[in-house]
Image (tube, helix red, strand yellow):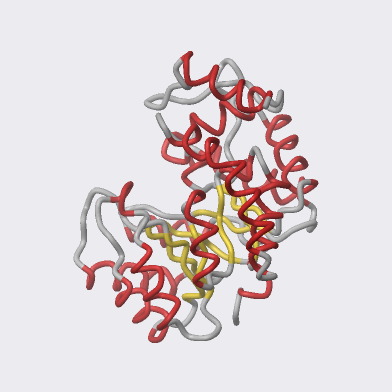
Amino acid sequence: MSLRPQLTGTGVALITPFKKDESIDFDALGKVIDFTIAGGVEYLVTLGTTGETPTLDKQEKLDIVNYTFEKVNNRVPIVVGIGGNNTKEVINDLQNFPLDKAVAVLSASPYYSKPSQEGLFQHYKALAEASPKPILLYNVPGRTGRNLAAATTIRLANEVDNIAGIKEASDDMNQMMQLLRDRPENFLVVSGDDALTLPQMGCGIDGTISVAANAFPKEFSDMVRFCLKNNFEAARKIHYTLLEAYDLLFVENNPAGVKGFLYELALIENMLRLPVTPLSGNVQQQVKKFLMK
């Protein structure tokens, strides 16, 4: 089964809003979900790492997934993030999380362990065999410490059933082009780098799973749709309008940057869980000035 028809375009890596006591703010989460869907995004990703999943306990994750399914109510497809560096534990989550209403699972490569390419292959193969939903690989070596090589990705795509695509966030344009050149026709390739989405769309990717689209759902999804229609002149205008925002989103930490934007948009409290802290005062002022422009 190909996910390209369902997941072409813009997906949003949803944040997890917190109240001032650091409990989950489900009302604010509902506002962000409605805001992004109204902005025209094609699908949502819940429990991605932008959702501060390393700081959420198991019950909180289950509550977020169930709330998201109920709130979205089939308006757009939903992808659920389930990953980690303990393969056995990830398999357990895949078999026990409520995934009936999900179209796919996004699974970040194992962090810290730095497995070999064969270790990465066997990890994802084990997940795919256990998962009730198609697996999207997530390569983000800046976070995990190990790159999922293009050759390993293509091997997984060709040899392992239930591996349906990849979110590629290596910042490596050559690697992205290798994936696009060598992928099977039904294999989904999306970007995980907001600032590189436009040039990567020019290379032929199917879309993006975006942090920026939490705060700029209309602008970002319009840009991606213009690219899909080969209207790069219109897409570039939006891209360059958002260029400063891309820097502000990631200058200190993700999701501190996007939460700073959503706070100024009056959608959430500016709360994060340690070890992540809100943007410093001068950067928050730059966020405010950007939005005023």
Query: Which sits in the foreground, 26 or 263?
Result: 263
Q: Where residue 154 sits: x, y (%)? A: 37, 79
Say left or right for 39 vs 276.
Answer: right
In the displayed structure, 181 sits above or below 259; it is below
Query: Which sits in the foreground, 211 or 242?
Result: 242
Residue farthest along the front direction in this orientation:
233
**Where is the C terminus found, in terms of image quarters?**
top right
Q: Where residue 37 sits: x, y (%)? A: 76, 49
In the displayed structure, 43 sits above or below 136; it is above
| Number of marks drawn | 0
Say left or right for 220 vs 109.
Answer: right
Quadrant of the rendered structure where residue 30 is? top right
Q: Where residue 121 sits: x, y (%)? A: 30, 73
Q: Where residue 172 sits: x, y (%)? A: 34, 60
Residue shown at 74%/58% (left/top)? 76
Residue shown at 28%/67% (left/top)? 120
In the displayed structure, 20 sits above or below 53; it is above
In the displayed structure, 48 sits above or below 167; it is above
Query: Which sits in the foreground, 290 or 178?
Result: 290
Residue shown at 69%/62% (left/top)? 226
**Where is the N terminus found, in terms of image quarters?**
bottom right
Query: Which sits in the foreground, 236 or 177?
Result: 236
Residue shown at 55%/36% (left/top)? 245
Say left or right for 175 vs 49.
Answer: left
